[in-house]
Amino acid sequence: MKRGKKLVSIICILGMVVTASLGAGCATEGQKGAAIGAGAGALIGGLANMHGSWGATALIGAGVGAGVGYLIGNEKDKKEAERHGRATEEELKPLAGTTWQVISVEPKPGKRHRSVISHFRHDGTAVTTKTDMDGKVEKTTEQYRIVGSTLILSTPNYVENAKFRIEGDKLFIDYGNGSAVLQRVS
């Protein structure tokens, strides 16, 4: 039982450290919510099971708390994107006015395209033009803004948070369940 209490304490301390570091940095509300939820869930999970495996209930609590916290935080991100309406100039850097062509996607999409080009406008909209193998062209428009190293793409129906980095003329995007590499066109 002492070992379980020690594990709960370690998880709680880790959750507080992560929460504090995210609060001080440039994390999205979804990321902050996941960290806070994990810490709170670990504490509640550990305390809820007075007669059993403290470590297991703390870990289950951390997992459930992280999921619920992320969902709540992601909803805050959606509301913030709606409230913002238009991103500030600072939230558009360094992508404003640039155009990128997708050169690889993992996992491979079911539908193949001849080309996929994304243009990040100065007004906070990202226009993606997909040209199918048969020449059919499809355009989608999303709002975008940047918080730290997170690219936030949104429409009235969804918000997508993706980690990104630029290395030379390449843009690397990690969506969590997939990734893409883009080549700078202009």
Image (cartoon, rainbow, N blue to C red):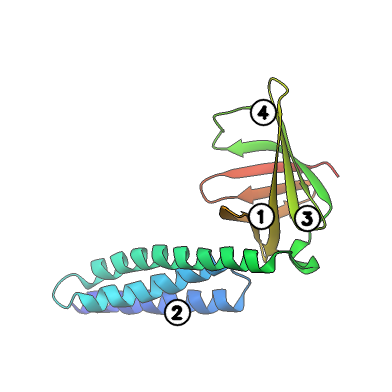
Q: Which residue is mark 2?
A: 16
Could you tell which of marks 4 and 3 lies nearer the N-terminus?
Answer: 3
Q: CA distance from mark 4 to mark 3?
A: 23 Å
Could you tell which of marks 1 and 2 lies nearer the N-terminus?
Answer: 2
Quadrant in the picture for residue 165? bottom right
**Relative to the observer, which residue lies in front, 28 or 5?**
28
Crowding at mark 1 (Cα within 10 Å: few <14, some 14-19, many 20+): some
* Residue 95: numbered disc: 3
Q: Is residue 4 among the parts visible in the rendering?
A: yes
Q: Secondary structure at mark 4?
A: strand
**Relative to the observer, which residue lies in front, 149 or 157?**
157
Which of the image's four quarters has the N terminus?
bottom left
* Residue 59: numbered disc: none
Q: Depth-wise, is mark 3 or mark 2 nearer the camera?
A: 3
Tell me the amino acid under the disc marked 2.
Answer: Met
Could you tell which of marks 2 and 4 lies nearer the N-terminus?
Answer: 2
Q: Which residue is mark 1?
A: 164
x then y, percent, for residue 160: 58, 54
* Residue 113: numbered disc: 4
Crowding at mark 2 (Cα within 10 Å: few <14, some 14-19, many 20+): some
